[in-house]
Image: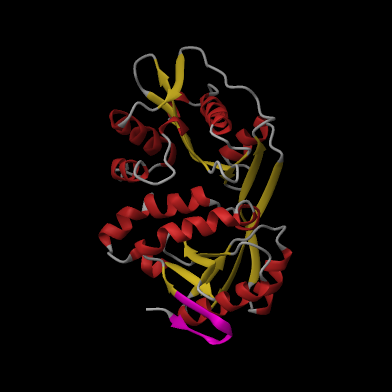
Amino acid sequence: MTVKRPGGFGTAPLTDDVLDESIAFLKSANPFSQYTWGWNTGRFIDFRWGVNVLNDSAEPGFFQRHGTVVRRGGDIVALVVAEEGGDDYCILTASEDTHTLDWALQELLERRQGTQVVLCPSDEATWVHEVLGRHGFVKGDVAGLEWGYDLGNVPEPLEPESFVVDSIRGPEDYAGIDRCLEGAFGGTRDRIPVLMSLATNPMYRSELSVVARASNGDIAAYCKGEVDPITGVAAIDPVATRPDYQRRGLGQAVVLRCFAEQRRLGGTMSFISSEPAGSAGSRLYPLLNPKSMTSHSEWSRLS
């Protein structure tokens, strides 16, 4: 049921029956929401069809609890999303809509009363900072970096010696990708259900899931991309190399191949996020001729 509030706004849970409309809204917000929050349609797809499918299976209703649609006059004007189901919220608008951001933030704080709320806008989005400051948020450390690439001006794909770089063949590659991701990022969870779910999303293109294969058949490196051919906005996440195959240029090789495929499918700009300076990504991504680099800092307050 929609909750009506003064000013013509209303909120409703982000349920499956509004997914198509929500995706259309994010397409209309590209690339603005990317530059402001580091979010584009592909990131929303990952939120809905990625690892959170396991969270929703374990806790039915996960998406409704951690995603909200904000409407005005019947139209979606914002999405409020906690990407990992914690205190990590973002409020996606399609423009510098201070009024909507202010209203949605107040509604979020009332709903989350007594808990911490964290948002990570771009450090260049000063209009967001002003609203957060009025609501008592305090700026903290840099939480991550966002690298932007002009797909017409990136290095050409390369083929490392003794490896083959190509798109995944299908579900038969999922076990190898799972081992690659576990080696790169740790953890012991079974990621195969996540890979299966991602392959069912409306933007999935198998040619944008790229691997580097060793001569013994190992999947040594992997990345997954998306592209919105209407707006030209593309993204790559994750990028992973197994520890026993690192320092051979494989991460660079799979990303460059993905860039080429994104360009072929209508992409004009692609974005990759990384941890702050000093991380593996922050060392790799400057080598690929980025057009931009934006930092995102945490803003938090106890609701």
The answer to whether residue 290 is seen in the rendering is: yes
Q: Nearer the viewer, residue 201 or 74?
A: 74
Residue 130 figure quarter? bottom right
Is residue 300 inside the magenta stretch? Answer: no
Determine the residue positioned at 28% across, 28% down: 172
Task: Check the image and name the residue furthest to the bottom.
Answer: 6
The answer to whether residue 113 is seen in the rendering is: no
Residue 230 figure quarter? top right
Magenta residues, start to end: 3-11
Q: How many numbered circles does the render carry?
A: 0
| Left or right placement of residue 195 versus residue 136 in this view | left
Determine the residue positioned at 67% across, 72% down: 98
| Left or right placement of residue 230 versus residue 122 in this view | left
Provide residue 85's location: percent of width, then percent of height: 41, 63
By what rule are the colours in the image chosen?
Answer: secondary structure
Determine the residue positioned at 58% across, 84% down: 7
Provide residue 294's location: percent of width, then percent of height: 68, 49
Q: Quadrant of the N terminus?
A: bottom left
Q: Would you place residue 55 above or below residue 117 in this image?
A: above
Provide residue 86's location: percent of width, then percent of height: 44, 65
Provide residue 162's location: percent of width, then percent of height: 46, 12
Q: Nearer the viewer, residue 145 or 83?
A: 83
Residue 260 figure quarter? top right
| Left or right placement of residue 231 versus residue 242 in this view | right
Q: Would you place residue 220 above or below residue 278 in this image?
A: above
